[in-house]
Image (cartoon, rainbow, N blue to C red):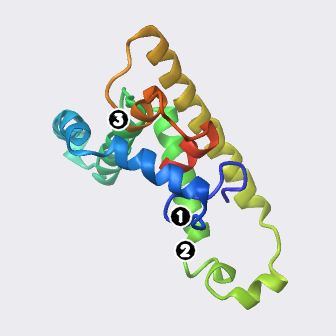
Amino acid sequence: MSSSQGFTIGTSPWDESCKRKRKAAATALNRSAVAAYLPVLDRESMASIRELWDDVRTIPNGEIDPRIYFQRFSLNTGLSLNYGTRIDGTTENGLLREILHVEKKIAAFRSTSNNWQDYVPVLRLWATKNIEAEGYRIRRDRYLTRLLNTLKENIENGTDKPCIAGTVLRNPENPVSEGEIYSEES
């Protein structure tokens, strides 16, 4: 799944790259950095509750599925904390739907019930390449690249908001490569 972006911080072998990623993450998650991220929770909570309330009042019969609001809250919180951005608009936003769909599929590929070769090493001898998983990896790479490029532009323009990837990118002693930044959020 992560062949282009590398391992995630939690699944990386303990090597120099993993040590650099963990050091960068620790810097971006120190006490003062975390305090700067708290307003994100307030903003996203209020936005989700407001939209849910507005939709309940305007949709005929008030019949809605609240899961999309919780998913958007979770996604926007993660995007704000990691990239300093959020997905505006309604729950019908195309990027929102794309990320939720792709991440749901990736989670299914990684689950213990669908991916036995990750949990039973001998099965790797007969493992086949999953073309569908590769397609979702490519789709995920597209929006991760887009998010990181937007953050870089915002940093250059001085319009960025406090976020983990921004803290890592701005650190002059940053030992982490761009590919390793992707895998921190994966």
Task: Please state which amino acid type lies under the numbered disc 1.
Answer: Ala
Q: Residues within 10 Å of mark 1 (few under 14, many from 20)?
A: few
Residue 92, placed above or below residue 130? above
Could you tell me how far apart the alpha carbons at marks 1 and 2 are, in whole angstroms? 6 Å
Residue under label 2: 111
Q: Is residue 123 visible?
A: yes
Which residue reaches farthest front? Answer: 173
Q: Are marks 1 and 2 in contact (CB under 8 Å)?
A: yes
Q: Is residue 163 left or right of residue 113?
A: left
Circle 2 residues within 10 Å: few <14, some 14–19, many ≥20: few
Q: Which numbered disc, 3 or 2, marks the residue that appears first in the sequence? A: 3
**Residue shown at 55%/57% (left/top)?**
18
Residue hosting label 1: 107
Q: Position of residue 87 (x, y in %)?
A: 40, 31
Quarter assignment of residue 56:
top left
* Residue 58 percent across, percent down from the top left: 21, 33
- At label 2, the amino acid type is Ser
Residue position for label 3? 80
User: Which element carries disc 1, helix, strand or loop?
Assistant: helix
